[in-house]
């Protein structure tokens, strides 16, 4: 499927009422899911149907560098993309997607190498690193977010519960878990639950649909996930902890039945922040730039059903709700640009899949 031609970007942006931002349209895509910046300020953007695009820094041109054979039904498709910590020398690109496998569908972690002459690069040598297990029927809650540890030695990968509930507490599978892997996709040494009957790659468990994961400047690992009917969460991810799903949640089931709330002493790690009604959190970014000094160190979350950009005030290992700014479109992804601007990807197509650059309003 050809990509939508890029619009002419607006360099300065238009103020967005009720927010501290000026908004400029950088490009338009067909159901984009994630993006990341290369050292030369070009961007990699994934589209749900399986296209990985290399986009110029100004958004005016793009090329398909890989077409991944995804299962794009429902919440599936080509998902996250990040570059290796040593990208300057290795040129490796890590990405996730949903695929059909033995017994059903599941989320896959893969990598390839950006190679070729300037202007003609392709993603080559693509290899599968990890498949979440078990693979099951259905098209929801794949998760598939990727983050490297600050030292670049390990890779954290999220696997959702696949809308099956109980796998999040099951020691024998990787669904509903945060996984800690080597860059080659094997279980990292020293994971906390390997001696307790869990798969050796499991770092934490009891999660639902983990659509954002990021480290702050102090090395704390933060994660956000969609709750059921209510109970969206921001969690501080600690090794070996049980985050409670589906046994506890600050939301309720879609059929109206109650789920016990998190409570002190219940044995589960409670969220640092939660929302009811929901924000439907998409991507997660922790801001470290200089364009918005008042927000340095804070978390930014894309709001899907809430059509908003959400700020969470991070202070050490504590978190508190900050602002929620309406952007008038479902926000799938949030990234920080090399110049300190905030970039957001809208969720969808037909001019609802735009890449927007947010800078301080005049």
Image (spheres, grey):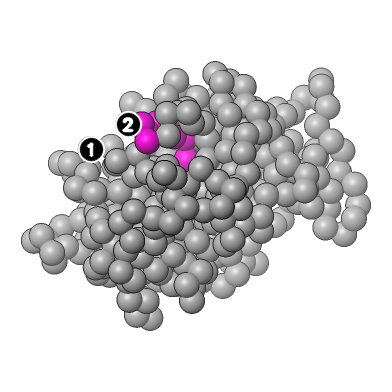
Q: Is residue 155 left or right of residue 249?
A: left
Q: What kind of secondary structure does the magenta stretch mostly adopt?
A: loop
Which of disc 1 and disc 2 is earlier in sequence? 1
Q: Quadrant of residue 4?
A: bottom left
**Residue 319: image x %, image y %?**
62, 26
Span highlighted in magenta in the image: 284-291
**Residue 21: image x %, image y %?**
47, 46
- Residue 152: image tag: 2
Asked if the stretch drawn in magenta spans residue 287, the answer is yes
Asked if the stretch drawn in magenta spans residue 261, the answer is no
> What kind of element bears circle 2?
loop
Q: Is residue 281 left or right of residue 293?
A: right
Using a 10 Å C-alpha cutoff, classify the residue at mark 2 as few (fewer than 14 neighbours), some (14 to 19) or many (20 or more): few
Task: Residue 214: tell me if it is visible.
Answer: yes
- Residue 86: image tag: 1
Q: Quadrant for the C terminus, please.
A: top left
> Mark 2 near mark 1, Cβ–Cβ under 8 Å?
yes
Q: CA distance from mark 2 to mark 1?
A: 8 Å
Q: Residue 8 versus residue 329: which sits nearer the camera? A: 8
Q: Quadrant for the N terminus, please.
A: bottom left
Q: Which residue is painted at 47% across and 67% down in the image?
A: 353
Using a 10 Å C-alpha cutoff, classify the residue at mark 1 as few (fewer than 14 neighbours), some (14 to 19) or many (20 or more): few
């Amino acid at each position: 499927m050809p990509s939508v031609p890029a619009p002419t970007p607006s360099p300065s942006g238009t103020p967005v009422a009720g927010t501290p931002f000026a908004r400029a349209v950088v490009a338009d895509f067909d159901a984009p899911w994630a993006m990341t910046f290369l050292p030369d300020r070009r961007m990699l953007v994934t589209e749900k149907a399986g296209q990985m695009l290399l986009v110029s820094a100004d958004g005016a041109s793009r090329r398909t560098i890989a077409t991944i054979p995804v299962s794009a039904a429902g919440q599936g498709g080509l998902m996250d993309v990040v570059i290796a910590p040593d990208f300057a020398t290795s040129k490796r690109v890590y990405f996730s997607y949903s695929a059909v496998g033995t017994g059903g569908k599941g989320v896959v972690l893969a990598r390839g190498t950006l190679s070729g002459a300037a202007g003609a690069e392709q993603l080559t040598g693509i290899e599968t690193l990890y498949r979440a297990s078990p693979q099951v029927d259905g098209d929801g809650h794949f998760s598939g977010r990727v983050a490297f540890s600050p030292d670049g030695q390990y890779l954290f990968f999220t696997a959702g519960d696949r809308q099956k509930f109980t796998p999040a507490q099951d020691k024998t599978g990787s669904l509903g878990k945060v996984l800690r892997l080597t860059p080659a996709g094997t279980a990292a040494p020293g994971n906390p639950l390997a001696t307790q009957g869990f798969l050796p790659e499991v770092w934490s468990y009891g999660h639902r649909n983990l659509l954002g994961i990021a480290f702050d400047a102090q090395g704390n690992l933060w994660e956000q996930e969609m709750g059921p009917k209510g109970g969206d969460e921001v969690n501080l991810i600690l090794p070996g902890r049980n985050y409670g799903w589906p046994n506890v949640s600050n939301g309720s089931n879609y059929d109206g039945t109650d789920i016990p709330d998190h409570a002190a002493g219940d044995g589960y790690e409670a969220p640092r922040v939660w929302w009811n009604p929901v924000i439907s959190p998409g991507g997660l970014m922790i801001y470290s730039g200089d364009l918005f000094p008042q927000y340095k160190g804070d978390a930014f979350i894309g709001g899907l059903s809430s059509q908003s950009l959400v700020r969470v005030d991070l202070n050490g290992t504590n978190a508190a709700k900050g602002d929620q700014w309406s952007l008038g479109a479902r926000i799938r992804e949030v990234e920080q640009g090399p110049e300190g601007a905030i970039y957001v990807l809208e969720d969808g197509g037909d001019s609802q899949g735009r890449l927007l650059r947010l800078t301080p309003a005049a």
